[in-house]
Amino acid sequence: MVHTEGPPAWRVSALVPFRALAAFEDAFAEDFTTVSTFEVEEDKIWVVEGFSAKKQDTRPLALRLALLASAMGVPEPVLEQERLPETDWLAASYRSFPPIRIGRFFIHGSHVEGGVPASAIGLRIDAATAFGSGEHPTTEGCLLAIERLGKKIAVARALDMGCGTGILAFAAARIWGASVLAADVDPESVRVARINARANRVADRVRAIVSDGYAGREAPEAGPYDLILANILARPLTKMAPDLAANLKPGGFAILSGLLSWQETQVRNAHRACGLTLADRITIKGWTTLVLRKRQAR
């Protein structure tokens, strides 16, 4: 989903109110392929930041933010741009990516020694140029949802829409032994997902493709699916609800994340209109993961 052209050397950031976080994050995503957010004041103020290899002309972004702030009735954010210090980015990535235990899953980089704990499912994901290392609450929520469903249903065919590093596709392949199509609009993410599939020894079950949502032929032709995973953002989740429903088997499940808790109603309503109902929900640090089920055919 995200990548940079070379190591990040510049950072552009703004303080924004929590209730408008998703909208400002979308605005940043128009200019930066690497965008992150973090909380500085509980339930009130967050930082949105974009990273790039080159210094940016921030005037177009500042104008979009001003218009957005006016439309939402919130204070206009002040943009700050700074040059990042020279860093050994590989070493820094390793230090910032210790092993993570999420339910049965043990997410680790190739630099981690000691092996995978007994009874755990190892997922090897190196710090890379694609989104999805297990650190974000949305990825954590999806992995927990996969584990919960793994105890209840069988999945033969799955789709990971917006796959990033491929972590959710690998988890599905490992839990169910499923055949998984991993799709992303970003060719760099697909490249990384293919490398990771080989590293996790699931390349025979996970196929990564470049796809603009469901617009291409490959994703619909490989369906319908028992399970669809989509860890993206609320707006595209809402927009793609009819396509998701059309590609999901009756009785099939969808795990959706990338939405803030206050955006849940919007996403649920869009999918309810397409025949999906809420089966489960996981909320972590203000981010919600939804598990939806499509109605059985009559």
Image (tube, rainbow, N blue to C red):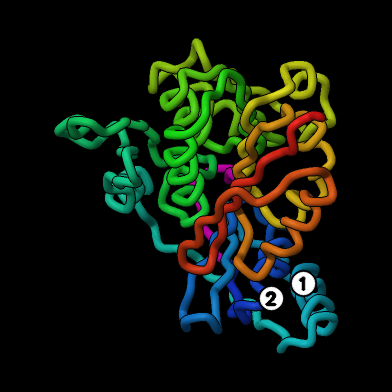
The stretch drawn in magenta includes residue 8: yes
Q: Judge left or right: residue 160 versus residue 247.
A: left
User: Residue 122 at x, y = what percent?
Assistant: 31, 31
Nearer the observer, 131 or 179 = 179
Please identify the residue farthest to the front as the structure is shown. 298
Labelled disc at residue 59 = 1
Give the quadrant of the C terminus.
Answer: top right
Give the image location of residue 13, x and y in percent.
58, 71
Residue at point 52% right, 19% down? Answer: 178
- Amino acid type, callout 1: Arg
Residue lying furthest top: 204
Q: Nearer the viewer, mark 2 or mark 1?
A: 2
Split into 4 quadrants, where in the image is the N terminus? top right
Seen from the viewer's position, the closer of residues 38 and 3 is: 38
Which span is picked out in magenta? 1-11
Q: Nearer the viewer, residue 125 or 34?
A: 125
Please give the name of the residue rendered at 62% of the width and 81% of the height, measured from the top-left corner: 17
**Of the residues shown, which amino acid type is indicated by label 2?**
Ala
* SS at badge 2: helix
Residue 52 appears in the rendering: no
Label 2 belongs to which residue? Answer: 20
Q: CA distance from mark 2 to mark 1?
A: 20 Å
Say which residue appears at 52% left-offset and 80% top-offset.
43
Q: Give the image location of residue 112, x and y in percent.
A: 22, 37
Side (left or right) of 197 relative to 60? left
Q: Would residue 204 be found to the left or right of residue 215 on screen? A: left
Counting residues from the start of the chain, the first of labels 2 and 1 encountered is 2
Relative vertical location of residue 232 with respect to residue 219 in this rendering, above or below: below
Which quarter of the figure has residue 263?
bottom right
Q: Is residue 126 left or right of residue 132?
A: left
- At horizontal 55% and vertical 55% (from top left) the residue drawn is 281
